[in-house]
Amino acid sequence: MEFPVSQPLRKMGGMDGVRERSGRGIRGVRYPLVGGIRGSASYAMNFQPVHSWEIAVTAVVGAGLLALGLWLIFHKRPTAEELERARRHFLAHSGRLVDGMLLDVCEVISPAKSKKEKDRTLTMLLFSYRIGGVDYESSQDITEMSGVIEAAQVRAGFPCSARYQPGNPHNSIVVAEEWSGLREGLPVFPSYDDPDPIDRSHLESPRPGRG
């Protein structure tokens, strides 16, 4: 393909062009030479400078992601007993007190979560309480608390104290390792002595004139 020649060839921007002249125009336009030997073609490549802080940030992010992945792989998930123990500890120190009543103690079979595990029999303590005119019934797992409470000694219908989480009244307990809301028996009200009896001795004395 030929291009008409309107102006003589000039050097532009310090780059020489290698062209072949013909009688009609310029034929076979090649790539410009950039700082190279005349007659050989070389290509210009632009390199963006990489700052040291970018390398540091990339390394820190990569190390954090690697550490997170390793933690998720090798970290042991808490068991149901550990979660229940943490819940009791939380409510025993930050739960609000409320009067309640023991309802019953029953055993519930918890199915196994995997084939390697076996079904577990849980001992549940049922109790009720009232907050703001609303009645709540809740339960607590006392299977691992044989040293704190004996299921045989729980009497249905006896009053107790419960601790519940503010904002979540359903989350409540009656006993914990460091606190117990059980009561030994029914409350004993103070007794008041009878006032001094009325002196009626003068009514029992014989009337004058009667022998």
Image (cartoon, helix red, strand yellow):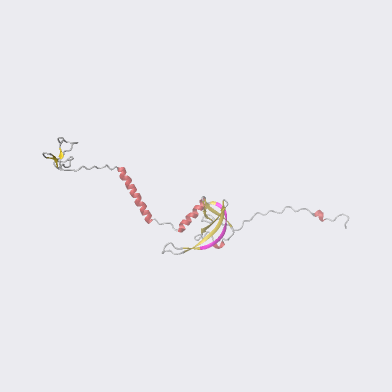
Q: Within the magenta stretch, is there residue 115? A: no
Instruction: Tell me if 30 is positioned left or right of 81 in this view.
Output: left
Which residue is most to the right?
209
Task: Tell which of 43 and 181 is nearer to you.
Answer: 43
Residue 149 versus residue 43: which sits nearer the camera?
A: 43
Quarter of the rendering occupied by the N terminus: top left
Q: Measuring from the top left, give residue 8's x and y in whole percent.
A: 14, 35
Residue 45: image quadrant is top left
- Asked if residue 202 lies left or right of residue 109, the reply is right
Question: Quadrant location of the C terminus?
Answer: bottom right
Q: How many marks?
A: 0
x and y percent of residue 178 in the render?
52, 54
Q: Residue 179 at what x, y percent from top left?
A: 53, 54
The magenta stretch is 97-107
Query: Is 11 left, or right, of 54 in this rendering?
Result: left
Front residue of this view, candidates 136 and 161 = 136
Majority SS type along the magenta span: strand
- Is residue 103 found inside the magenta-colored segment of the image? yes
Is residue 55 rendered to the left or right of residue 134?
A: left
Quadrant for residue 158, please give it.
Answer: bottom right
Q: Is residue 54 above or below residue 78?
A: above
Question: Residue at point 32% right, 45% down?
Answer: 56
Residue 170 image position (x, y, % from top left): 52, 54
In the image, what residue occupies the spot 54% across and 61% down?
105
